[in-house]
Image (cartoon, rainbow, N blue to C red):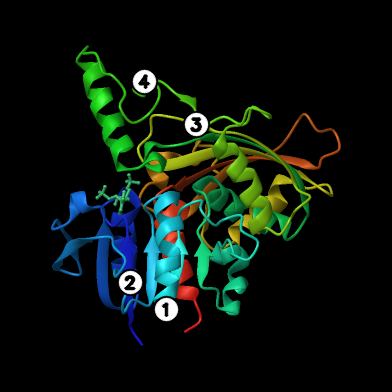
Amino acid sequence: RPLNVAIVGATGAVGIELMGCLERRGFPVASLRLLASPRSAGKTLPFRGQDLVVEPLGPNSFDGIDVALFSAGATISRQYAPVAVAAGCVVVDNSSAFRMDEDVPLVVPEVNGALLADQPKVVANPNCVAAIAVMALQPLHAHNKVTRVIGATYQSASGAGAQAMAELEASTAAYLKGEAYAPQVLPHPYAFNLFSHNAGVDAETGYNGEELKAMAEIRKIMSAPDMRLSFTCVRVPVLRAHSMSLVVEFENPVTPGEAEAWLADAPGVRLVNDHAANHYPMPNEASGGDDVLVGRIRADLSDPTGRTLSLFLSGDQLLKGAALNAVQIAEALPR
Ligand code: A2P
């Protein structure tokens, strides 16, 4: 039967994409309730040719709702996910609030969608770096165990929300006009610059919060608690697709040709690996698309044992890194 769906954070960068994914994928929506802060109450957003009115999130927001898609930050999720569950809703949560809870599945359907058969009340949607990385790592790991990954990311503005995207545009325009621009959303100048990811730094390890999330979540999604990972997460002046370099060490020797064949068969992955044309994954080609682009597959010359490959990925942070994955989870929920 069609479902009554709510989106918490409907006016945000991910919220808008959630509506788009529901519509584009023909999700069986009986009704859609758009929820945001009181600031947005009364605004309208288009869905399937109709203008829907945004309602302020409150204690009765989930009455009569079957599935609630949360994307308004961890504080709102901690406060309202229990309210939604008490109202009989299944929650798909895009925030970090419950991702590492032992009894909450952290799901990328192509990797561990089988966990949804247990009918969880809350399902966590992964951090965008983790979601995009596992799309390439899992098909490799299934053939030849991945023992270690060194990652470096090139992360877009969209991961920090709609206001950060607007800041990238406004600060770039100001820069080109030679005008001063004081950053309001992000901690550093963004136009023609890049900086360590703005999630706070862990005093003990020196890793930033994004790096720690990505590493822990990749292990959890892939059920690989002993996988060794080290990430460096960087914000770059790109609007909405994340890119990353992954240096992947395997248990057994591996060739680029083998990896390419394994990835060619992987759902949700598209090879962009044209050495002759020097054409590899780029954020502008990943933006707006469902697939994670994978290329630059090459043997790591620093490993004489032939067990290490380097790859480069681009994936739309707002789609596979957030809204698309959440809607895929909702589609796969047992009904
Ligand atoms: P609003 O637009 O009314 O502020 P983004 O990640 O793009 O910044 O979006 C965050 C989303 O979370 C927006 O839809 C925002 O709504 C919503 N949000 C922020 N604070 C609250 C709140 N206190 N209650 C409900 N929704 C909120």
Farthest residue, direction bottom: 1
Residues at circles 2 and 3 in contact by the CB criterion of under 8 Å: no
Q: CA distance from mark 2 to mark 1?
A: 8 Å
Taking 20 as reference, is 296 left or right? right
Is the CB–ligand 1 distance for label 3 below 8 Å? no
Residue 9 position (above or below residue 173) = below
Q: CA distance from mark 1 to mark 4?
A: 45 Å
In the image, what residue type sits under mark 4? Pro
Q: Position of residue 35 (x, y in %)?
A: 27, 61
Report the mark closest to the observer, 1 or 3: 1
Residue under label 4, please give it.
189
Taking 123 as reference, is 24 left or right? left
In the image, what residue type sits under mark 1? Gly
Q: Secondary structure at mark 4?
A: loop
Q: Residues within 10 Å of mark 1 (few under 14, many from 20)?
A: some
Q: Give the mark nearest the N terminus, 1 or 4.
A: 1
Residue under label 3, please give it.
197
Residues at circles 1 and 4 in contact by the CB criterion of under 8 Å: no
Residue under label 2, please give it.
62
Q: Secondary structure at mark 1?
A: loop
Is the CB–ligand 1 distance for label 2 below 8 Å? no
